Image: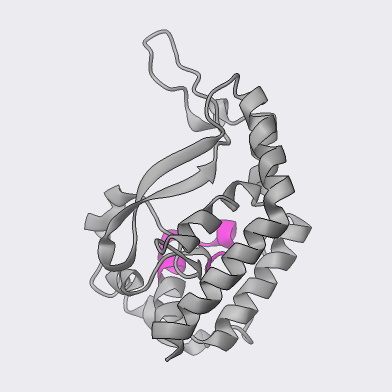
Amino acid sequence: MYKNLFKRIIDVLLAFVGLLILSPLFFLVALILLFTNKGSSPFFFQNRPGKNEKIFKIIKFKSMSDERDINNKLLPDDQRITLFGNFIRKYSLDEIPQLINVLIGDMSLVGPRPLRVRYLSFYTETERTRHLVKPGITGLAQISGRNSLNWDDKLALDVIYVKKMSLYLDIKIILKTVLKVINGSDANLSENIIDLDIYRNIKQQNV
């Protein structure tokens, strides 16, 4: 019942309220990006796979410039990220526009993060189960030491989330995400959040 009905209702209500509360910050960030990006769009759009691998356009604040080399090719990412772009990434402010994705039904507040379309052909059958639910703005991997986890760990945590999805788990993830954003750093993995025996078992299966 939660997965098929109440989760969507909660997503819409919280995303709407979130956009209202964050609207001053939303417009402030957009205005600063419009200035720092020299008039180019403050928003970044990119195709990502959603539920059942249906492709949608994710919306984020643009944290990198469009600077190119003498051959008109984009410079490497680490050379294009702006000072302000680095700031909004640190505090996850670049994710705010994804509340729009939640409202229109492409995403959920909590779920596996939508990765690049080009990765679809590399997933194992077990890993593909991450696409049985809507992708999220935040997820189990994001509150479990996002930057310290390797690829397999992140995908294993996504699979665990799909298996254990519940209102209680979503609330835990949202609260830990808020703490992470406030601290500007990754949260630590908590045995109160997931069953580490399930996690280790999935890793042993080479997920």
Q: Residue furthest top?
A: 70
Its colouring scheme is one colour
Q: Is residue 62 left or right of residue 88?
A: left
Tell me how many marks there are.
0
Q: Residue furthest bottom?
A: 1
Vertical position of residue 111 compared to residue 114: above or below: below
Measuring from the top left, give residue 77's x and y in whole percent. 50, 32
Identify which residue, 167 or 193, lies in the foreground. 167
Vertical position of residue 120 compared to residue 28: above or below: below
Can residue 41 be seen at all in this image of the molecule? yes
Residue that appears at 52% across and 88% down:
195
The quadrant in which the C terminus is found is: bottom left
Vertical position of residue 53 compared to residue 159: above or below: above
Q: Is residue 1 left or right of residue 37?
A: left
Q: Quadrant of residue 134?
A: bottom left
Measuring from the top left, give residue 111's x and y in whole percent. 47, 70
The quadrant in which the N terminus is found is: bottom left
- Is residue 8 covered in magenta? no
Identify which residue, 95 or 91, lies in the foreground. 95
Q: Where are the magenta residues, as a range?
A: 138-155
- Is residue 152 covered in magenta? yes
Residue that appears at 37% across and 73% down:
133
Can residue 144 be seen at all in this image of the molecule? no
Q: Is residue 91 left or right of residue 9?
A: right
Residue that appears at 40% across and 65% down:
152
Measuring from the top left, give residue 93's x and y in whole percent. 65, 49
